[in-house]
Image (tube, grey):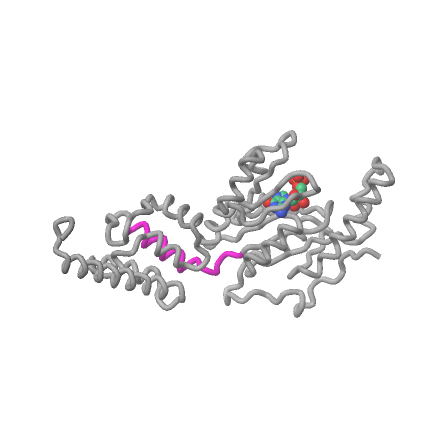
Amino acid sequence: MTNGMPDVDRSAASRAAVAARRARAAVKQAVRAGDRSARDVAQVAWRDASSPEAGLRVPELLMSLQGFGPVRTADVLDRLAISPVKRLGGLGPQQRQRLDDWLRQRDEARGAGRLVVLAGPTAVGKGTVSAYIREQHPDVLLSVSATTRPPRPGEIDGVHYFFVNDAEFDRMIADGELLEWAVVHNRSRYGTPRPPVQRALDDGRSVLLEIDLQGARQVRETMPEALLVFLLPPSWEELVRRLIGRGTESPEEQARRLETARVELAAQDEFDELVVNDEVRRAAQEVVDLLIVPSDGVRPPGRAGSGATTTGAGPH
Ligand code: 5GP
């Protein structure tokens, strides 16, 4: 006998603990497999305080949801003001209400928002198109990237970028806070903070990422449901004109830029949709149309089957 408990009782208690753990694991597995909704699990927990559901910790329930890891779970718990040590059965009435509302909204919003990546060659006008969308369509979340490059005059921290130092960028990578990141132009690091994107999608809002090609490729791997849009210049000659500009660069620099553009344009085949930036307003509208999920939930076919725009530039 130890701790004042007879040995027979101790072994019965540990058998019961093992059985309870198994029952909780089965609940999580059912949610993970999509056989049970998280909301149903919560309702059972709140009806029956002695159920396995009631013994489930809230983060365990959230982590059983598709696409939920530690970072996203911590973010949601923070928003709901629920401590990560809480079990479902131990939540107060207001916490129950907040969690239930969140789960319900999540069910309703699922599939309503879409993640669209806008990429394209240097100088094609991605920034202008996305700035137009930011102004005209505040319902779309235009992701604000983190970068290690210093701000340019007029750029505001938290609006144009989150300007961070190398140590902070390292920390964001280590903590899994970035959806994608890349070294751009061999200089600074740029990355997409994950929590705001996930939050918007959870709320049924569409999200636009204006990022470079390396980042677009990472998003295609990690979020295959994202729609990849490639912005094209009206013609190769026009891109050359925009790149070379007033011709103030040396011939070597001009040649380097053209070679970069040629390589970047070759990536267009990897994208779902091509949009020609002949006129900012029109191109932006085309991107906005792609951000809206059709009511039947079916994504318009990608370029393979859709006869997508073929009038864009190609290096000749
Ligand atoms: P700039 O320094 O001129 O603002 O941006 C340089 C390049 O970085 C642009 O091509 C832009 O698309 C890219 N970029 C901006 N934010 C991100 C990001 O979060 N991830 C990646 N991969 N590229 C980014």
Q: Main secondary structure of the magenta part?
A: helix
Q: Is residue 51 visible to us here?
A: yes
Depth check, front residue: 243 or 38: 38
Residue 132 in view, yes or no: no
Q: Position of residue 292 (x, y in %)?
A: 55, 58
Farthest residue, direction right = 251
Which residue shows up at 13% across the image and 53% down it? 1
Q: How many marks?
A: 0
Where is residue 146? Give x, y as percent. Answer: 57, 40
- Residue 48, quarter of the rendered image: bottom left
Quarter of the image for the C terminus: give it.
bottom right
Name of the residue lying farthest toward the bottom: 305
Choose top left, top right, bottom left or bottom right for residue 218.
bottom right
Asked if residue 106 lies in the magenta stretch, the reply is yes
Give the vertical position of 257 relative to 268 (above or below). Answer: above
Q: Residue furthest top?
A: 153
Above or below 78: residue 11? below
Where are the magenta residues, as a range?
A: 96-114
Q: Going by the image, does 230 lie left or right of 196? A: right
